[in-house]
């Protein structure tokens, strides 16, 4: 509340605020907030909500009394960076159900799916709506749209326990109703919503058929689901579960490892080993998925130094190297078994100082190709009996790094939306290719960045399986020959090293995935021999965000077609390495985009023949 806030704002005040802000042309959100504060103080009114200001702005636009400003529009939208990039992230939880895991730190609330507590924001919403996927999806879209967020591209995150532990019928029904909810919002004649029980006497294939219809419709619907993330355990990943998750439209998997140390995994009763995780990530990579690995510092049996060491091994171990990580420092919740350990002295967190030091080191150890998507879990502090309670930990860490002249180069920190103020408005993005090996293949992390590599305008993940057609097997090597250096070898596009063939011994691959499993995948996924397919595992551009941030710049036209440039580079690298086929793990709502680039639906993917 403002010191001078005396009156409640009127419609006339709204117009004055909008006109003042537009006249000032703020370039950053901080400046926008500043101007907003100043005008409200001079009018002696309380600050109105962005929602009201946005409605007034739209009215004024319609009347022609102001000119459009995309930048101000986006400051008015209570947007996070993801929605500024034109993508609405919608999260919903599955119903309460058991999980095969017995992890001692995992909260257990009867009315919630395993590992979630009712006071977390997405959990509270899901509970209110009785975990109904249709209502949750529609409710969220309508709410976001009311607040000015566009919802034409939806990244859908389904959370709760272990996805594959739920009955297959439930999984298909949940996804079916999520797609239906999107489609029905603008469908001329909405199709009828179903309940889980409606499918009791029907088969999986009936559900698949119904889901296929909704997915086909969604390809051209107003509210398109462009990607689905599912959360599961490594020991639930098999060729069959991969097949089903692909059919459901899944493009990314969140996979809990927590600690790459079998002694700790046993102590906390994870119920799987590090090798099982290695196998899961390899199966998923072979199938083109992106993997978001969960890492948990401060578990029983560790120290800050051991946590740092384990985290570094995520990137030096060729069998791990995740695309994204969620770092969730351990916290003790009363409903978890760990609470008893805390009470009887079997567990003691290592303290704020140790945690802070470990997290700083983790940020610095993260390579460019990996995105730290979360740094703490959104648990209200009054639920936490021990462990981290600082909610703005990420900002604090960033400030410390800045003060000491250090930088986190993880993908998230370099996204152009966060770096706009550090680059010139007329910068022309250029292509960089970071290469790194993983068991079973070589990864090409292709980015469009400013020449100083401060900001990423778009990126693509290309995987070339080992034993390229016509190449002899050679032993895999670690990046830069230094296992401690997590940074990939960096080359610009066109550099000849992007075509150096590199092949692991097949024994390395077979130690985690058997020939039978690989053959199963080949058969189930419908792409033929996956060893012969170059895979685009992710394509993401921030074109809209750039357009907004660089409004008025004569160079903004250079930021058009970022995706096409990245795709062309990936195809060039694949061709150079003699791949005749390239596939994309496309979300349902973006199939049309790839079709325009000459790709055709192939199984649940889109693919294209390459000229070599
Ligand atoms: S696997 Fe995940 S959801 Fe299941 S008990 Fe362990 S932490 Fe909880």
Image (cartoon, helix red, strand yellow):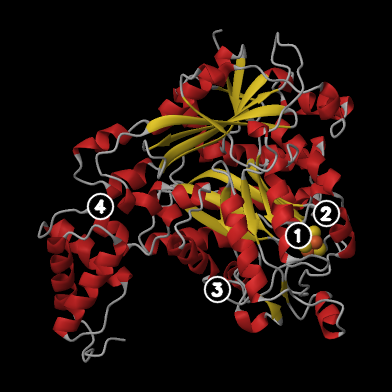
Instruction: Name the residue at 59% across, 35% down.
Output: 488
Residue positioned 25% across, 84% down in the render: 46
Q: CA distance from mark 1 to mark 3?
A: 24 Å
Looking at the image, tell me whether mark 2 or mark 4 is earlier in sequence order. Answer: 4
Q: Mark 2 highlights which residue?
A: 261
Percent x, y for residue 156?
A: 57, 51
Instruction: Single out the mark in the foreground, 1 or 2.
Output: 1
Badge 3 density bin: few <14, some 14–19, many ≥20, Cα 10 Å: some
Q: Is residue 439 visible?
A: yes
Residue 554 sits in quarter: top left
Give the Cα distance between marks 4 and 3.
Answer: 31 Å
Specify which label sits upstream in the sequence, 1 or 4: 4
How far across and down, in percent of the image, does residue 196 sit? Answer: 73, 56
* Position above or below: 395 against 278: below
Mark with earlier residue (1, 3): 1
Whichever of callouts 2 and 3 sits on the residue coming sooner in the sequence is 2
Instruction: Report the label total.
Output: 4
The part of the image, by quadrant, that contains residue 47 is bottom left
Disc 1 C-beta below 8 A from ligand 1: no
Secondary element at image label 2: loop
Residue 70: mark = 4
Give the number of the mark in front: 4 or 3: 3
Q: Judge depth for marks 2 and 4 and give the one in front.
A: 2
- Tell me the CA gap for discs 1 and 2: 10 Å
Task: Tell me whether circle 1 and circle 2 mark residues in contact (CB < 8 Å).
Answer: yes
Q: Earlier in the sequence, mark 4 or mark 3?
A: 4
Q: Toward the viewer: 427 or 1?
A: 427
In what quadrant of the picture does the C terminus appear? Answer: top right
């Amino acid at each position: 509340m403002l010191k001078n806030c005396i009156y409640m704002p009127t419609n006339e005040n709204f117009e004055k605020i909008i006109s003042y802000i537009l006249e000032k042309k703020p370039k950053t959100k901080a400046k926008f907030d500043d101007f907003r504060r100043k005008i409200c103080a001079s009018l002696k009114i309380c600050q109105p909500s962005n929602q009201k200001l946005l409605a007034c702005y739209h009215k004024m636009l319609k009347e022609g009394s102001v000119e459009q400003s995309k930048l101000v529009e986006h400051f008015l939208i209570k947007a996070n960076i993801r929605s500024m990039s034109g993508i609405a992230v919608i999260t919903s939880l599955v119903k309460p159900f058991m999980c095969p895991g017995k992890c001692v730190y995992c909260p257990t609330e009867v009315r919630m799916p395993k590992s979630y507590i009712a006071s977390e924001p997405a959990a509270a919403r899901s509970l209110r709506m009785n975990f109904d996927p249709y209502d949750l999806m529609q409710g969220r879209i309508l709410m976001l749209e009311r607040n000015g967020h566009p919802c034409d591209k939806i990244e859908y995150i389904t959370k709760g326990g272990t996805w594959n532990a739920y009955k297959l019928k439930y999984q298909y029904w949940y996804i079916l109703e999520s797609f239906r909810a999107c489609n029905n919002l603008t469908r001329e004649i909405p199709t009828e919503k179903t309940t889980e029980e409606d499918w009791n006497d029907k088969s999986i294939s009936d559900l698949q058929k119904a889901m296929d219809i909704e997915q086909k419709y969604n390809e051209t619907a107003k509210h398109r689901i462009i990607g689905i993330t599912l959360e599961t355990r490594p020991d639930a990943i098999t060729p069959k579960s991969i097949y089903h998750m692909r059919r459901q439209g899944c493009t990314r998997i969140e996979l809990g490892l927590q600690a790459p140390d079998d002694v700790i995994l046993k102590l906390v009763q994870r119920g799987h080993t590090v090798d099982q995780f290695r196998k899961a990530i390899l199966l998923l990579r072979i199938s083109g998925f992106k993997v978001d690995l969960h890492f948990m510092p401060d578990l029983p049996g560790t120290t800050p130094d051991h946590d740092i060491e384990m985290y570094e091994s995520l990137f030096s171990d060729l069998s791990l190297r995740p695309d994204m990580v969620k770092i969730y420092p351990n916290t003790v919740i009363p409903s978890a078994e760990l609470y008893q350990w805390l009470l009887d002295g079997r567990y003691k967190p290592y303290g704020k100082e140790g945690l802070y030091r470990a997290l700083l080191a983790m940020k610095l150890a993260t390579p460019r190709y990996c995105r730290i998507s979360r740094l703490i879990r959104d648990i209200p502090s009054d639920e936490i009996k021990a462990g981290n309670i600082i909610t703005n930990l990420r900002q604090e860490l960033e400030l410390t790094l800045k003060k000491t002249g250090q930088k986190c180069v993880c993908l998230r920190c370099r996204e152009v939306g966060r770096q706009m103020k550090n680059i010139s408005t007329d910068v022309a993005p250029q292509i960089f290719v970071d290469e790194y090996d993983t068991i079973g293949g070589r990864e090409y992390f292709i980015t469009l960045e400013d020449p100083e590599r401060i900001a990423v305008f778009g990126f693509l993940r290309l995987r070339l399986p080992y034993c390229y057609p016509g190449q002899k097997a050679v032993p895999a090597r670690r990046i830069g020959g230094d296992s401690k250096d997590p940074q990939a070898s960096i080359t610009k596009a066109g550099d000849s090293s992007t075509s150096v063939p590199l092949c692991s011994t097949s024994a390395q691959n077979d130690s985690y995935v058997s020939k039978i499993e690989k053959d199963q995948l080949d058969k189930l996924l419908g792409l033929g021999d996956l060893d012969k397919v170059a895979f685009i595992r992710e394509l993401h551009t921030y074109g809209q965000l750039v357009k907004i941030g660089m409004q008025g710049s004569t160079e903004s036209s250079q930021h058009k077609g970022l995706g096409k440039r990245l795709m062309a580079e990936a195809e060039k690298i694949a061709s150079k390495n003699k791949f005749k086929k390239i596939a994309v793990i496309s979300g349902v709502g973006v199939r049309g985009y790839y079709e325009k680039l000459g790709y055709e639906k192939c199984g649940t993917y889109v693919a294209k023949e390459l000229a070599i």
